[in-house]
Amino acid sequence: MTVRILLADDQPLVRSGLRVIMSDHPDLEVVGEAATGSEAVRLVGDLGPDVVVMDIRMPGMDGIEATRLITAGPATARVLVLTTFDEDDHVYGALRAGASGFVVKDMALDDILAAIRVVAAGDALIAPGVTRRLIADFAGRPEAAPPQRSPRPVEGITEREREVLTLVGRGRSNTEIAEDLFITVATAKSHVSRLLTKLGARDRVQLVITAYEMGLVTVPR
């Protein structure tokens, strides 16, 4: 399958460099370029890309607002945020806006291309270790709701799915979930898939946030 990509970055040199690099990979096709967030939103509707590689700091509408509009709209495009900035503010803003991954421009090029493929395949580019750090930091942010003393009920899911959601929120991989619950990896993956459907979550990142907001995950002080 060829992954159709829209590049959204206000620096022509960055877009040109990424386009040249991707041209050497037959499974990746750049279908358009945007220099602003508003242009990215328009081109998603016009071109129907699979993945938008989105910069955050752009003139006018920034990448976070553009991500929010893209993921809230009818398009199925997934957003991979690619930026020179890796401060927590941008991570949280991008993920809560609906981005499926967050990478920085000084990463190895092969890792960036791998990230595009991961996001296009429907997964989220959040490694378990990174998830744990994000949740720990997220808990201390002023805009984050404090954990509930008792977990709030999550409507429409089974007790086993609730256990799986809790473990996803703790940053556990499917393999680790299988080990913790004495089930197969395939069964763990099936539970995660059903949770995505039942909770209307785009990806694993949103499951992590849901687990925290429901009080299923608390952060050690």
Image (cartoon, rainbow, N blue to C red):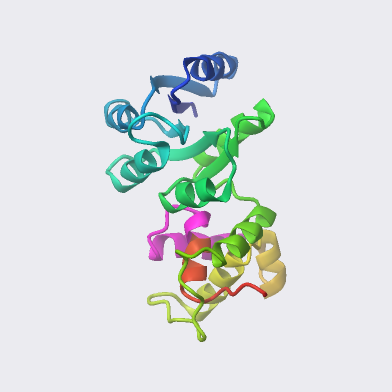
Residue drawn 66% across and 26% down?
109
Residue drawn 61% across and 60% down?
186
SS majority, magenta: helix
Is any part of residue 205 visible from this angle? yes
Across the whole image, how many numbered discs are drawn on residues? Answer: 0
Position of 33 with respect to 190 (left or right) is left
The image quadrant where one finds the C terminus is bottom right
Q: Position of residue 210 (x, y in %)?
A: 47, 66
Residue drawn 31% across and 33% down?
41
Residue at the far bottom in the pictured view: 150
Taking depth in this image into account, of 134 and 199 the one nearest to the observer is 134
Magenta residues (range): 186-206
Q: Position of residue 150 (x, y in %)?
A: 50, 86
Q: Position of residue 34 (x, y in %)?
A: 38, 23
Position of 113 with respect to 203 (left or right) is right
Is any part of residue 173 visible from this angle? no
Q: Is residue 191 magenta?
A: yes
Residue drawn 51% across and 46% down?
90
Residue 74, by quadrant, is: top left
Taking depth in this image into account, of 108 and 110 the one nearest to the observer is 108
Above or below for 209 versus 45: below
Q: Position of residue 130 (x, y in %)?
A: 65, 53
Position of 193 with respect to 183 (left or right) is left
Q: Is residue 45 magenta?
A: no
